[in-house]
Image (cartoon, helix red, strand yellow):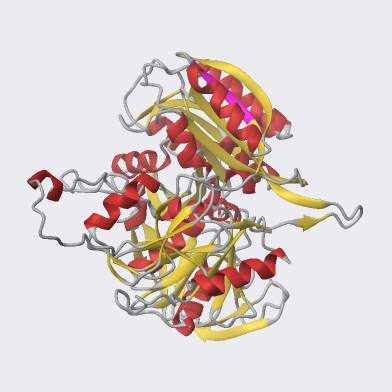
Amino acid sequence: MNLRNVAIIAHVDHGKTTLVDALLRQSGTFRDNQQVAERAMDSNDLERERGITILSKCTSVVWKDTRINIVDTPGHADFGGEVERIMDMVDGVVVLVDAAEGPMPQTKFVVGKALKVGLKPIVIVNKVDRPDARAHQVHDEVFDLFAALDATDAQLDFPTLFASSRQGWASDKPEGPRESMAPLFDLVLKHVPPPKVDPDAPFAMLVSLLEGDQFLGRVLTGRIHSGVVRANTTIKALHRSGEKVEETRITKLLAFRGLERVAVDEAQAGDIVAIAGFQTATVADTLCDLSVEQPIAAIPVDPPTLAMTFSINNSPLAGTEGDKVTSRVIRARLFREAEGNVAIRVSETADKDSFEVAGRGELQLGVVIETMRREGFELSVGRPRVLMKTDPQTGQRLEPLEDVLVDVDEAYTGIVVEKLAQRRGEMKDMRPSGGGKTRLLFSVPSRGLIGYHGEFLTDTRGTGVMNRSFAGYGPWRGTIAGRGKGVLISTADGNSVTYALWYLEERGPMFIDPGIKVYQGMIIGEHSRDNDLEVNPLREKHLSNVRTKAADEAIRLTPPRRMSLEQAIAYIADDEMVEITPKSIRLRKAILNPHDRKRAQRAAGE
């Protein structure tokens, strides 16, 4: 059977996964009466809740006797590593662009990666059924983007289709005919070349994806570069250095058929398959015949830009809500994550109870933490910090910079420019984008964006849209002011009391409800001033013989400020931590005892 391997890449929320849904339906992969969830490829619980793709996934359809392997990729910059590592698996890319928004920062990031490895793109201007669609202008903007990314003449001569993933049609003109996805299928067959492979050479395959299966164990996915692989044969794994990792028998050979992975007896060069049976082989290793000596070269992945400290939960409430609490199980889980996720790096620290985890951004690390807490882990994490570099020639200090594209109503332009300037951002472009909105482009240090997104939504009354992508390293831009407010710190252990919280409300907004377990050193609210304040949330009302009004007893509290995991991580200062359990997210000081805390502050001041 003929083969085509293609990846779908786009900015977040431009309709990649919805497009794959339409392709699966119209290729006959589903029965007419089969009930299939919307965004079928987003099978992970977190992906469904957040409405974003986190992991790259494979599927396949058959069109006119040709099998098309499709790889759905994430659109968020934090998960760029998932896009980079699948470039080896495909021979073409479908670039999806929103007909109203046009090319966005992540579009530029992923298209740059695809053009660099020589892939020829197919462009789809999606969502042309939107009332504010500007299909032809967006097509011109895509051409300008490709030219700015130094595309070759062959890459600039890209075919374009106009489509609506939700309505399930594609056409060479925005006005139609609006019938089906057949034009896209036909274009993939015509424009994407068959895999360039050597079917007669010994078997060799580069591992691009890794996952764990409770029945099969370690499952390694990649494209077969040469030869034929058969189930139950013995093969070996080579490290990228050429060193032999292990030798094993293939226990299961799986091919992608629609949304399912189906066991097959053999697979040919060019096909994307999953192999089970290995114990230690991982991403970027080469699985090959015993006679092969040279590994396949892997595309390098951009390094992490942000790091956090993960440590055991040592608060007085440790072990009361989770069952995985020791440093040994946390260490094993983090190293397992780093094995399958090439954009994450885990290293041990001098303190055996804590580990440094480096990744692409707050969202990526937040997803790792959220996954762990759902698995029953308890842990504490520190404030994110950026990973600096030193220029080897000049000795200059370099820091990661990001391109930030902001769409806001004209009324809020001033506050956004002011806030990003305070965070050492430099404006590169400002233009009206229609409908009373302005589009702003900034270059901002990554450390200046930590914790800014929530503030941005508040400043723009929830109407602003901010997109970021890693731009590279640049000279250090100077100090950035930290959080402007102090915190309210509990001085006692026990359950919080309504009367005490009522009195504390004048000091600042609360983070907790009455009746919640608190402990010494736990952060229970924000101070209205810039210093920290130690308070007693257990204070009871003194009883007396004097009668009081009934109204005096009916205390009404302002609802507390509830923070999501990402908001809590972004909120804390350098001397604070977030305590994470399967049931709770608590803020606390790293040093719980107030006397020890003061001694540490004095020592730091000296």
Q: Position of residue 180 (x, y in %)?
A: 33, 30
**Residue 523 x, y percent position in the rendering:** 42, 60
Query: 387 or 515: which is nearer to us?
Result: 515
- Quarter of the rendering occupied by the C terminus: bottom right
Magenta region's main secondary structure?
strand
- Residue at image position (45%, 13%) is 435
Residue 20 is one of the magenta-drawn residues: no
Provide residue 398's location: percent of width, then percent of height: 78, 51
Tell me the quarter of the picture where residue 356 sits.
Answer: bottom right
Q: Give the quarter of the figure containing the N terminus.
A: bottom left
> In the image, 548: left or right of 87?
left
Q: Which image quadrant for residue 321?
A: bottom left
Q: Is residue 192 above or below residue 570?
A: above
- Seen from the viewer's position, the closer of residues 592 and 606 is 606
407 to 215, vertically: above or below: above
Q: Is residue 324 in view from this perspective?
A: yes
Q: Is residue 190 above or below residue 35?
A: above
Residue furthest front in the image: 546
56 or 271, which lies in front?
56
Foreground: 452 or 253? 452
Does any portion of residue 103 appear in the rendered image? no
User: Furthest-right residue in view?
Assistant: 393
> How many numbered callouts?
0
Q: Which residues are magenta?
A: 437-441
